[in-house]
Each structure stands twice: as C-alpha cells, then as structure tokens.
Image (cartoon, helix red, strand yellow):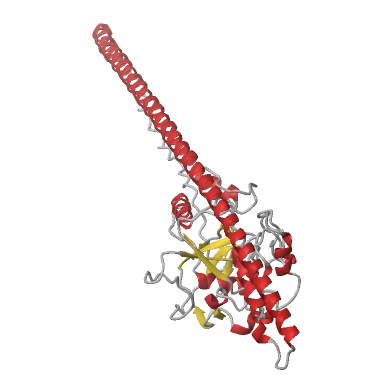
Amino acid sequence: MLSDEYYRLFGLERNASSKDIKIIYRKLVKRFHPDSLEQGASPEEIKSAEEYFKRMQEAYEAIYSDALNRENIQGNREREELERRQREEKEGAKKKDEEERLRRQREEAARLKREQNERGHEEKSSGGKWFFGAVIFFAVLALGWYGAQDSSNSAISTPQKTTPYATASPIMTAKVTPYAAVVTPSSDQKNYTNSIGMEFVLMPSGEFDMGSPWDEFDVYQSIEKSYEIPMHRVKLERIFFIGKYEVTQRQWSDIMGNNPSGFRGEERPVDTVSWNDVQEFIRKLNEKEFTKKYRLPSEAEWEYSLRAGTSTLYSFGNSGSLGDYAWFSTNNGSRNVGQKKPNPWGLYDMHGNVHEWVQDRWHENYKNAPTDGNPWENEDFSSDRVFRDCSANSYNFYCRSAVRNHMSPTSHHNSLGFRLVKDL
C-alpha cells in the first residue's frame, strides 16, 4: 500500500485528485529545484537539495499514479452506474409508454360507449316526441269535428273568448368562462414564479469585464487559469429572468417523471444530468407552458448574473467567508438550495453547490469570444459544453467568479446540475 508519507510531503489528503497533485507539484518544482539555490551554496546544501528533489519526484510519480488508478476505478464505477440507470430509465419509459397506450385505449373505449348511449337516448327521445305529437294532432281534429257538430245543432251561437297564443320565452345565453392561461412576466416585474414553482429574478441590462487578469490568483498559475483569459468587455442590451435557485429534483421530476440524482433530496439541485438531458427538460417545460422562452443561460449571462456589478474575486469581495455563500469541500454532495447567503442580485448558490451547465460550446480561452452576451456556438474547436460554478466537492480555488470548465454534452456526473433563463 502507498505510504501516507508521500501525500504528507505534498500536504495532500489521500483522496486528492490527479489535477491537484499536478498543480502542487509544479509549485514545489519551482520552489525546491536545485537550480533555484542561491549562488555560493555549499556542496552539502546542493547535495541535500538534490536528494530532497529526487525524493519529491519519487513521491509525485507514486501518488500521481495512485490518483489516476483511483480515478479510473471511480470512472468505471460511474460508467457502470450510468449504464444501469440508463437501462432502468429505458425499461421505465417502455413501461410508462405501455401504460399510456392502455390508458388511451380505455379512454377511447369509454368515449365510444358514451357516444353510443347518447345516440340511443336521442333516438328514443325523438321517437317519443313524434308519438305524442301525433296523438295531440288527432285529438285536436276530433275535438274540432265534435265542436262543428255542436255548433250546427245550436240555435244561438255564443261568442267565445279567444285566448292569445303563448309568447316565446326569452332565449337564455350561457356565460362563457375563459380557460386559465399561463401568466407571462413583464419587464415591470422583478420576480416571477412559473407553474412548477421555479422562481426567477430579473437581470438588468449592462456591461461587465468577463474573465480574470493573470494576477488574480498567483498561487495557481495553472492550465485551468489560462481558460479565463483574455479579460474582455461584454455588453448585454437585453434584460432577462434567471433562476433564483438551481433547478431542484422536485421540479425535474414534475417535468421528466424521474430523478437521476446521485445525492437525493427534493429540494437539492438535480444532478447527474447531461447537457442533452437538460435540453429535453427545457423542451418539455416550454411545451407545458405553451412558450419557447425557457433556455440555458449563455456563459456571459451566467457570469454577469453571478458578478452582479462586482469585479472582485467573488461576488462578495476579494476576501470574506466563502462558507457563508457556498457549499464547497464538503465531500458529501450537494445541499438544499437557498441555504447560504445570496449574491448582491438575490441569486443563491452561484459560488458553490453543483456545477451548472450553460449553453456555450467549449473554447480553451476567450480569444475572439462574443461581446454581446450571446452563446458562443462556433463548432470549430470542440463539441464539449461549458459548465460554471463550484460544486460541493470542489476546493475554494474553483469557486471564484471567473472559473470555467467543460465536459461532453452526454456526460453525467453527480456534481453537475443547472439553472434556467426565461426570456421576456
């Protein structure tokens, strides 16, 4: 078994990721490489530095290999779990389709029987009307004949008081009640709640600097940091509603009829949903509310909403208690939405709970990125999709306002969720 001493040398826990190990190794190389010794170092100091550096390299190779093996095992487990869930969902969908087919058959049979009964009742009623009409007709003729006979036998004819014909009753007009409609939000509203309880907050138009400068987080000059440059000015002219919270498992179940989440709880954000799954959710929600206005935010809209007019490391400043605003480094998965403090514009969990899908395709930096807030859909670079936000299992470095990353649109992970935008 791998010695804990190697991990202690790097100041890491045994469950550290290969990515974090690589970042720390780069820092240590820069600091402890023998070439970094000051001029005039004694032979003993040089030898000691070389021995320490050699030991550090051995430790790195060992723990990096260990981390990769762990991640491969975990990846295999996740793939097996995903395949199992997909099989269950397919079987569930098949069963649901069969139940729906049988339900429709029963409804159709009931409708046909109801129509048949109504036709029989109308025929019976019509026949009765004709019969009684004929009886009355012949009765009137008979009375007329007897009356004529009586008149001819009478010496004096007595005038009869004429009874006027009965007047028709006024026609009754039914009062029509219109169907209930889905309420459409307006620009005057600051908040909006839809038919399944999703709450939205209105975002104003404006401009902001998207990305980060190189000196934002000097300790981690890593490849992930290069994703966030160059910082560029973005102008959003349209206003839009964005989810006050991440989409919950209850809301997902209301629309999709299932719950794929790894960390269960009705008010926890839904997780283990791919970008493609989210598109299907959006399609069904739009269909339910007779609209086409629900969608994922663009990456620019997401960061604009998170920063909320700030340009600091976090939306609450360059320092402060991240734990007041975000779930991170818990290693126990997501938590119920809305338990931490909101950002300045009233949005919750923007610094940490689950990662959040956005609409854009992945590009490794912001060179030639759109400056109008629209999604970056250029297909030349990658088919991957961008996700933002920090998850409950991430370190604080990944909770900064500018952090971005990517995955395949078919990927499922128990730290991946989303929130929605609704256009006006």
Q: Looking at the picture, how far across and down is residue 134, in whole percent? A: 27, 14
Which residue is at a point 58% across and 48% down the rendered structure image?
261
Residue lying farthest to the bottom in this orientation: 40
Depth order, front residue of 83/110: 83
Q: Looking at the picture, how far across and down is residue 136, in whole percent? A: 31, 14
Which residue is at a point 32% across and 14% down the rendered structure image?
132
Residue 147 picture quarter: top left
Q: In this view, does 193 lie above or below 152?
A: below
Q: In this view, does 17 lie to the left or right of 273?
A: right
Depth order, front residue of 380/92: 380
Q: Is residue 304 left or right of residue 285?
A: right
Depth order, front residue of 92/104: 92
Instruction: Name the quadrant of the N terminus.
Output: bottom right
Which residue is at a point 40% across and 71% down the rendered structure image?
381
Residue 415 picture quarter: bottom right
Q: Is residue 357 left or right of residue 123?
A: right
Observer able to see residue 156: no
Observer able to see residue 342: yes
Which residue is at a point 50% across and 42% down the rendered structure image?
84
Q: Looking at the picture, how far across and down is residue 417, in whole percent? A: 56, 57
Q: Looking at the picture, how far across and down is residue 30, in whole percent? A: 64, 81
